[in-house]
Image: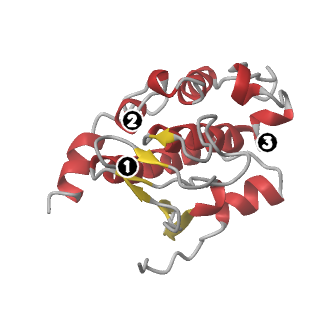
Amino acid sequence: MYIEHMNEATLIPDQVMDSWTPIELNQLKSFLKDTLKGLLYLHKNAIIHADVKLENMLCYKNNKDYCVKLCDFGLAMKMEEGFCTLKEFSGTLGYNAPEVTKGAWVTEKIDMWSLGICLYEMAVAYKPSVLNKSFNKDGNVQFRDWDWKGLDEAKDLVLKLLKVNPDERISAEEALKHPFLDDEDWEDEFRNLHSV
């Protein structure tokens, strides 16, 4: 698979992971929307990315606007009858959903968990495991008030993405409709972009 040249490819991990700097709010929303649109396309075609993480979110800058695209489909899986069976442990530690274990039946909801980790990390420049090592088992996602000041809708979206039970976790389509992203034009844009 080939992807066009992404002239700011490592912007997100460089800023968040290397510089410990959160992504500015409007950029965060834009990056998240682009990633969700990519995941929605994959999921509607019964494909699980299975390795959503900051390093796999590549940026392209055109004038002042950025575009984010997912890369690294080496672990991607095709769902049959709505799920896949993991032959081995896959994904990246720190981003894996709780249900990701060898032999487990998984759905596209593993990508949504990973995106919840990415959203948390882009918003505050650290993973939720910094505050609670066992949050992926007990579902207790913690937030430092001063880091999340003014980000109540983002917190709500994180909580909906990081549900331990995958049946309770929201889908890409539901996440795009969340008030944090409040973009009513995404459906028409998505249809026009993928009406092939």
Amino acid type, mark 3: Tyr
Q: Check disc 1: other Cα within 10 Å, few if <14, some if 14-19, many if 20+.
A: many
- When asked about the image quadrant of residue 188, the answer is top left
Examine the rendered structure and indicate whether residue 42 appears above or below residue 146.
below
The answer to whether residue 69 is above or below residue 23 is below
**Residue 44's spot in the image, x, y percent?**
28, 47
Q: Quick one: SS at disc 1?
A: helix
Residue 126 has which mark?
3
Query: Which residue is under mark 2?
Result: 176
Apparent side of residue 126 relative to residue 178 in the rendered image (left or right): right
Give whichever of 63, 150 is nearer the camera.
150
Residue 72 horizontal/vertical position (percent): 53, 68
Q: CA distance from mark 1 to mark 3?
A: 24 Å
Specify the color scheme. Answer: secondary structure
In the rendered structure, are the residues bearing label 1 and label 3 in contact, judged by CB atoms less than 8 Å apart?
A: no
| Of callouts 1 and 3, the N-terminal one | 1
Residue at left offset 53%, top offset 41% = 104
10 Å crowding of disc 3: few (<14), some (14-19), many (20+): some
| Image height of 4 relative to 90, above or below | below
Check disc 1 and report the residue beneath it: 37
Which amino acid, by three-letter code, is at mark 1?
Lys
